[in-house]
Amino acid sequence: MLFNIITLSIFSVSFIYFFYKGVDINLLFIPFISIITYLLIIKDPKNQEKYHYADWTLTMPLMLYALLSANKIPLTKSLQLILLGQLMIFTTIIGNQANINFWFVTESFFFLPILYTVFYLKSNKPAVYLTLLLWSFYPIVRILQKDNIITPDQSSTTFSIMDSIGKIGLVDLLL
């Protein structure tokens, strides 16, 4: 519980900072959505995983669009990649409920074109590398939890740390 309160505080302070700095509204929504997520997690800690997935369904498109638009990627290409990202999250949710390796392969199928495209972006390299690094760890954490190497609470804590670094870092690097 304390860790979630700390994470909520970090997102809240970063939101105020970014608001004060006049960050673009699309980027400002990223920490704002996470504030709502952690308020819900604190109120209902048994459903942390559900709230994380809801958060990612909303913030991943914003983060991906921010990176792609900063690199002047056409809207049609951006929308295609965002759709792949949503399919990746959807198949991840199914895979967690069905506990079938087929879904992990399927979500990876949707994830790889995103990784490939982001890797070759030319501008804002620190934001690109941060995003690539952190987004690549999400499936590893899921595998560790699925194989009972880490607990669901440890997984949720790890996701929270990665979310904080990735979201706040991305917004800050794109300022």
Image (spheres, rainbow, N blue to C red):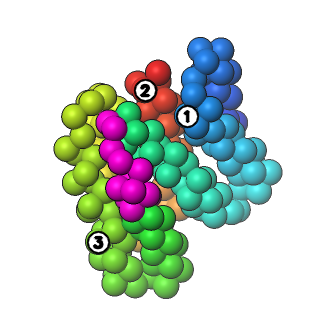
Q: Nearer the viewer, mark 1 or mark 3?
A: 1
In depth, the one of 73 and 84 nearer the eye is 73
Furthest-right residue in view?
43
Residue 43 rendering spot, x and y as whole percentages: 80, 51
User: Could you tell me residue 21's position as x and y percent?
Assistant: 59, 14
Q: Residues within 10 Å of mark 2 (few under 14, many from 20)?
A: some
Q: Secondary structure at mark 3?
A: helix
Q: State yes or no: discs 2 and 1 in contact (Cβ < 8 Å).
A: yes
Secondary structure, mark 1, is helix
Q: Earlier in the sequence, mark 2 or mark 1?
A: 1
Residue 96 spot, x, y in % from top left: 49, 75
Quadrant (top left/top right/bottom left/bottom right) for the N terminus: top right
Circles 1 and 3 in contact, beta carbons < 8 Å: no
Q: Give the residue type at disc 3.
A: Phe
Query: Residue sitting at 53 percent across and 61 percent down?
Result: 152
Is 114 contained in the magenta span? no
Q: Which residue is mark 2?
A: 174
Q: Quadrant of residue 56?
A: bottom right
Q: Which mark is residue 27?
A: 1
Q: Where in the figure is residue 125, as x and y percent of width and height?
A: 26, 30
User: Which residue is label 3 attached to?
Assistant: 109
Task: Residue at 57% x, 28% y: name it.
Answer: 24
Q: What residue occupies the far top of the structure in this picture?
A: 21
Q: Residue at coordinates 38% horizontally, 33% vertically from top-left?
A: 70
Q: Amino acid at mark 2?
A: Leu
| Quadrant of residue 13 within the rendered picture | top right
Report whether 150 appears left or right of 130: right
* Cα distance between the residues tagged 1 and 3: 27 Å
* Frontmost residue, 34 versus 117: 117
Assess disc 1: are there few (<14), some (14-19) or many (≥20) residues with their C-alpha within 10 Å of its C-alpha.
many
- Tell me which label, 3 or 2, sits earlier in the chain: 3
